[in-house]
Image (cartoon, rainbow, N blue to C red):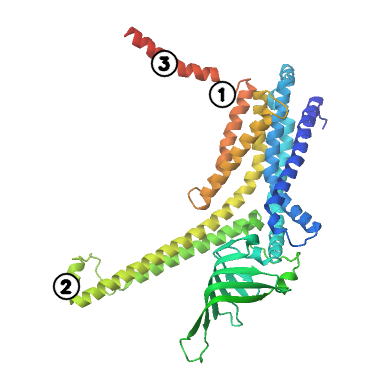
């Protein structure tokens, strides 16, 4: 198939801008990535090869962000240059319409669309797998980084939870809870302290944790026939723990033990996970509903009654009149305790169901996001190309401003809709696709108006429509 001279010129103009800005933006985002994760690399004596390997693993995740922005920018600049230099007017005089001029670029961006889908569905899950495992292995090389606030962290022979980290290198801790591991996997020793401090200067292959103002609880084992075991509680003003870190200092950065996050899955794996999680979620809801029903005692009321006629309820006062005052109080208190227990159980189960639903929504969003990222490559071209022909400005000034405004609006609106979809406020499908649907409509309108040599907004017509009712009103007032 022979490519015409005009198609070669359009392709050359477009691809020159596209390739140049793609590598420039990739470099900028990679530098930004280094700054974001600098704390995970600093002070660990890592080779440059480890940093380069991390950037190599992380770079594919930037492609769905960089490529659509590059396509939008290149399309606006290319067609803006054509319009500004009257090349587009010359094309029209030769019978080449806007859609005809866009035809070779539609093919190029369709290939980019397919490439983006392949990267999102195949390369990014593998890159996420490699990145996640490398970061986990790096965190083990510096235990202070391995301690996350608000959750238990497995360090050495202990599980450590802190309420807050602060100070230089996050070495100062607040609200420390430590569960020491045992061979029978039961927490026999629990330590709680108001404050703590991490020190690694005292020990060569370990970490010294100094705790202040706390208690040490230890369960005392009894004979097998004893149902209850007593425990000792010891108060302390300062308590020092030495944690063996030889396993931290001998880390294999190529180790891959973590493979269970939804970001590591492709479309088919995500679909299976969604089906499995949904079935499990429905089963949990049905099980909880059955448990609540049984706890109410309704099933045991009038179990042997054969008639379907409703029974009349004369109120709690009539029921309680047959009991003494002390018995009434006991019954009322028992009823209150039962109601409070049921409310507490319902609130806890509500939070659990919210987390389950959020996990399912995250899987659905991540699956739809693979299609959205691919579609963005072709959609933003149909937004940028007609806008470039309409604004008739090329170069690096106004087109870059327009491209950034459109892309930032697209990106932040998409993030807002996805966040709403995570907690169930919005359907996950709409959360992923809504902003793309809106921009598709914008691209369609812009393409139609650019093909007819019209601006996106006819300001003169808008002024006329606003001004006309006021003029008619003033005439009526004068004539009245």
Residue at disc 1, secondary structure: loop
Asked where in the image residue 74 lies, by quadrant, the reply is top right
Give the camera-side residue of 13 and 185: 185
Q: Residue 288 location in percent, x, y? A: 43, 66
Give the camera-side residue of 434 and 80: 80
Left or right: 260 in relation to 351: right
Which residue is at a point 72% across and 53% down the rendered structure image?
58
**Residue 343 seen anywhere in this rendered image of the structure:** yes
The numbered disc on residue 470 is 3
Residue at disc 2, secondary structure: loop
Q: Residue 207 location in percent, x, y? A: 67, 72
Which residue is at a point 65% across and 32% down the rendered structure image?
401
Which residue is at a point 61% across and 72% down the rendered structure image?
210
Labels 1, 3: front one: 3
**Dot 1 corresponds to which residue?**
457
**Dot 2 corresponds to which residue?**
321
Find the distance from the CA under tag 1 to the CA under tag 2: 78 Å
Picture quarter with the C terminus? top left
Q: Residue 21 location in percent, x, y? A: 75, 37
**Residue 187 seen anywhere in this rendered image of the structure:** no
Local crowd size for mark 3, using a 10 Å CA cut-off: few (<14), some (14–19), many (≥20): few
Asked where in the image residue 386 lies, by quadrant, the reply is top right
Residue at disc 3, secondary structure: helix
User: Who comes first in sequence, dot 1 or dot 3?
Assistant: 1
Give the camera-side residue of 136 and 269: 136
Find the distance from the CA under tag 2 to the CA under tag 3: 77 Å
User: Who comes first in sequence, dot 2 or dot 3?
Assistant: 2
């Amino acid at each position: 198939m022979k490519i015409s001279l005009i198609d070669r010129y359009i392709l050359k103009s477009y691809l020159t801008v596209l390739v140049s800005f793609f590598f420039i933006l990739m470099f900028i985002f990679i530098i930004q990535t280094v700054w974001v994760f600098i704390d995970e690399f600093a002070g660990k004596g890592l080779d440059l090869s480890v940093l380069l390997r991390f950037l190599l693993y992380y770079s594919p995740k930037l492609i769905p962000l960089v490529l659509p922005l590059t396509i939008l920018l290149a399309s606006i600049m290319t067609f803006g240059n054509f319009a500004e230099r009257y090349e587009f007017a010359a094309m029209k005089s030769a019978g080449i319409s806007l859609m005809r001029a866009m035809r070779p670029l539609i093919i190029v961006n369709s290939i980019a669309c397919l490439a983006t889908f392949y990267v999102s569905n195949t390369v990014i899950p593998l890159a996420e797998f490699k990145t996640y495992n490398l970061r986990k292995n790096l965190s083990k090389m510096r235990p202070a980084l391995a301690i996350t606030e608000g959750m238990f962290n497995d360090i050495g022979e202990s599980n450590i939870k802190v309420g807050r980290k602060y100070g230089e290198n996050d070495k100062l801790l607040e609200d420390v809870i430590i569960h020491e591991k045992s061979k029978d996997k039961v927490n026999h020793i629990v330590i709680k302290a108001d404050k703590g401090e991490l020190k690694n200067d005292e020990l060569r292959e370990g970490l010294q944790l100094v705790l202040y103002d706390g208690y040490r609880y230890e369960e005392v084992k009894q004979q097998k026939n004893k149902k209850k075991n007593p425990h000792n509680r010891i108060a302390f003003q300062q308590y020092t723990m030495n944690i063996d870190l030889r396993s931290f200092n001998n880390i294999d950065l190529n180790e891959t033990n973590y493979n269970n996050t939804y970001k590591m899955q492709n479309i088919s794996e995500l679909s299976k996970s969604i089906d499995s999680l949904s079935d499990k979620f429905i089963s949990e809801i049905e099980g909880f509903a059955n448990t609540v029903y049984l706890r109410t005692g309704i099933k045991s009321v009038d179990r042997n009654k054969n008639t379907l006629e409703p029974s009349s309820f004369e109120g709690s006062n009539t029921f309680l009149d047959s009991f003494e005052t002390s018995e009434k109080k006991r019954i009322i208190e028992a009823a209150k305790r039962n109601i409070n227990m049921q409310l507490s159980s319902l609130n806890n189960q509500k939070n659990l169901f919210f987390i389950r639903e959020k996990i399912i929504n995250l899987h659905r969003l991540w699956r739809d996001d693979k299609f959205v990222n691919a579609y963005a490559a072709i959609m933003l071209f149909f937004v940028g190309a007609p806008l470039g022909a309409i604004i008739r400005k090329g170069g690096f000034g106004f087109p870059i401003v327009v491209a950034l405004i459109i892309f930032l609006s697209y990106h932040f609106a998409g993030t807002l809709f996805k966040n709403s979809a995570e907690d169930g406020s919005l359907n996950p499908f709409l959360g992923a696709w809504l902003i793309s649907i809106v921009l598709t409509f914008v691209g369609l309108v812009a393409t139609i108006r650019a093909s007819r040599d019209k601006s996106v907004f006819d300001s003169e017509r808008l002024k006329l429509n606003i001004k006309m009712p006021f003029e008619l009103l003033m005439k009526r007032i004068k004539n009245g």
